[in-house]
Image (spheres, rainbow, N blue to C red):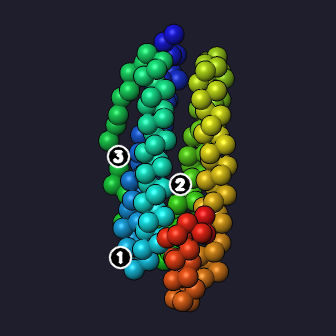
Amino acid sequence: MKMNETVAVALNRQINSELNASYTYLSMAAYFDSIELPGFAAWFRGHSKEEIEHGMRIYDFIVKRDSRVELEGIDKPQLNFDSPTAALETALAKEKEVTAQINALFELAHEEKEYSTQNMLHWFLEEQIEEEDLFRSILEKVKAAEGNRWHMLVLDGELGKGIAN
């Protein structure tokens, strides 16, 4: 059964948003590489890849529903940050933005009686709870460590090994 057109358009926008988040996190990885924190860089590269996977999850759903995927351009991401804390605050704000978008998509799917879309979005609702919690946790650790290079290097090592996640 072909998907409701309004919902299909909104899901296509969400693919673009997920790819934009991926690009943003890749830019953050480059920032952390530039300040010699390779663990943070690897962590953000991993999240960049994860956002692509999220976009592809929606892509595949649209195709399965006999609708057309329509990709848009991706804006240039922010390249520099005043500090690791500023980068993590930006990342957490991005996750909150995505959460709001997923919530709006769920509401739209409900209004349009797109029940299978609601079902697919349940996974994203849970994922965003985990993502916001994770980013908030890392931000708090960075706030506690920032200003002390040794503590930042220890946290960097933990992120690089996946311990601080």
User: At 52% from the left edge and 70% from the top edge, which residue is drawn?
Assistant: 161
- Residue that carries the numbered disc 3 in the rendered image: 74
Name the outermost residue toward the top. 1
CA–CA distance in space, label 3 to label 1: 23 Å
User: At 44% from the left edge and 66% from the top edge, which residue is drawn?
Assistant: 42
User: Tag 1: residue type?
Assistant: Ser
| 77 in relation to 106, above or below | below
User: Tag 2: residue type?
Assistant: Lys
Give coordinates of residue 8: x percent, y percent.
Answer: 48, 23
- Residue that carries the numbered disc 1 in the rendered image: 34
| 119 in relation to 93, above or below | above
Give coordinates of residue 3: x percent, y percent.
Answer: 51, 16
Front disc: 3 or 1: 1
- Residue that carries the numbered disc 2 in the rendered image: 94
**Secondary element at tag 1:** helix
**Secondary element at tag 2:** helix
